[in-house]
Image: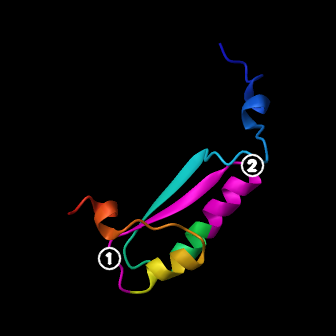
Amino acid sequence: MDDGSQLPALLERDAADDEIELSVVMPCLDEVETVGTCISKARHACESNAISYDVIVADNGSTDGSQELAAAEGASSPSRSAATGRR
């Protein structure tokens, strides 16, 4: 039975460690009005909990500038074919 005594050790992380602990993946199709806020909230949640993370916006062909905004906010964005599995 886990009494939670190991939790602090699990949360400790070496500052030099670049290992990603969490990947936040956000689906996106014409979300220019909200994608920046979503990325900011994900970033804040991870940083305030000392979680090493990356944010991936899986854009499915947005035409409203969502992908460009996501990139400006520091999110990575796979190509449309990679995000949807299409070839």
Position in image of residue 85 (x %, y %): 26, 58
Mark 1 element type = loop
Quadrant in the picture for the C terminus: bottom left
Which residue is denoted by mark 2 in the rendering?
50
Residue at position x 67%, y 54% in the image: 46
Position in image of residue 57 (x %, y %): 46, 66
Quadrant in the picture for the N terminus: top right
Residue at position x 45%, y 68% in the image: 77
Of the residues under marks 1 and 2, which one precedes in the sequence?
2
Q: Amino acid at mark 2?
A: Ala
Residue 57 counted in the magenta span:
yes
Position in image of residue 17 (x %, y %): 72, 45
- Asked whether residue 34 appears in the rendered view, the answer is no
Q: CA distance from mark 1 to mark 2?
A: 33 Å
Instruction: Pick whichever, 5 or 63, lies toward us.
Output: 63
Mark 2 element type = loop
Residue at position x 67%, y 50% in the image: 52
Position in image of residue 44 (x %, y %): 70, 61
* Quarter where residue 84 is shown: bottom left
Horizontal relation, residue 74 to residue 58: left or right: right
Q: Amino acid at mark 1?
A: Gly
Horizontal relation, residue 39 to residue 61: left or right: right
| Magenta residue span | 40-63
From this viewpoint, which residue is outermost toward the left? Answer: 87
Which numbered tag is attached to residue 61? Answer: 1
From this viewpoint, which residue is outermost toward the bottom? Answer: 64
Vertical placement of residue 69 versus 74, above or below: below
Horizontal relation, residue 58 to residue 76: left or right: left
